[in-house]
Structure formats: C-alpha cells, structure tokens
Image (cartoon, helix red, strand yellow):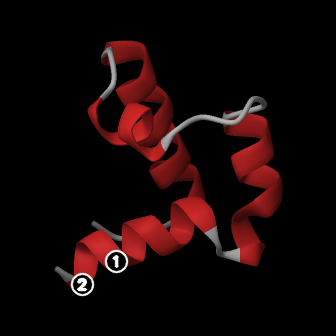
Amino acid sequence: MLFALDTFYTHIYCPTHQNLRAETWPADTPMRDKLYGPMESLRRTAAFIRASGVAV
C-alpha cells in the first residue's frame, strides 16, 4: 500500500518532480492511463519513475 501512495504522490503532487511531469506528460493525462493504459503510456510512466529516482 505504501508503494501505491508513494507512486500517487510522485505522479500528482511532489513539487520536486513538477518539471519532469510536465516533460513526460505535456497534456493532462488521467492517472488511469498512466498506470493501466496502452503500452506506450506504460513506457512513459516507467521512464518517468526511472528519471524521478523513486525506488520500486
């Protein structure tokens, strides 16, 4: 459960990753698409997590 909360926080709120979020998802993208979308969406999410340095 903690991982899910950390992921949610990093994706939505963490000010440290604001620029990275804007670069990764220039348009508003629903969380559902980021986590359960098509392969390209999942690749983008994985790249964001790697670039953010969040340990999973």
Residue 9 location, x and y as percent?
51, 74
On-image quarter of the C terminus: bottom left
Residue behind mark 1? 5
Residue drawn where x is 50% and y is 30% of the image: 44
- On residue 2, the disc is 2
Figure check: 27 above or below 20:
above
Q: Amino acid at mark 2?
A: Leu
Q: Amino acid at mark 1?
A: Leu
Occupied quadrant, residue 28: top right
Left or right relative to 12: residue 49: left
Residue 21 location, x and y as percent?
70, 49
Circle 1: is it few (<14), some (14-19), or many (20+) Cα within 10 Å? few
Q: Nearer the viewer, residue 45 or 54?
A: 45
Occupied quadrant, residue 40: top left
Q: Nearer the viewer, residue 6 or 33?
A: 33
CB under 8 Å between discs 2 and 1: yes
Residue 7 location, x and y as percent?
40, 66
- On residue 31, the disc is none
On-image quarter of the N terminus: bottom left
Left or right relative to 2: residue 51: right
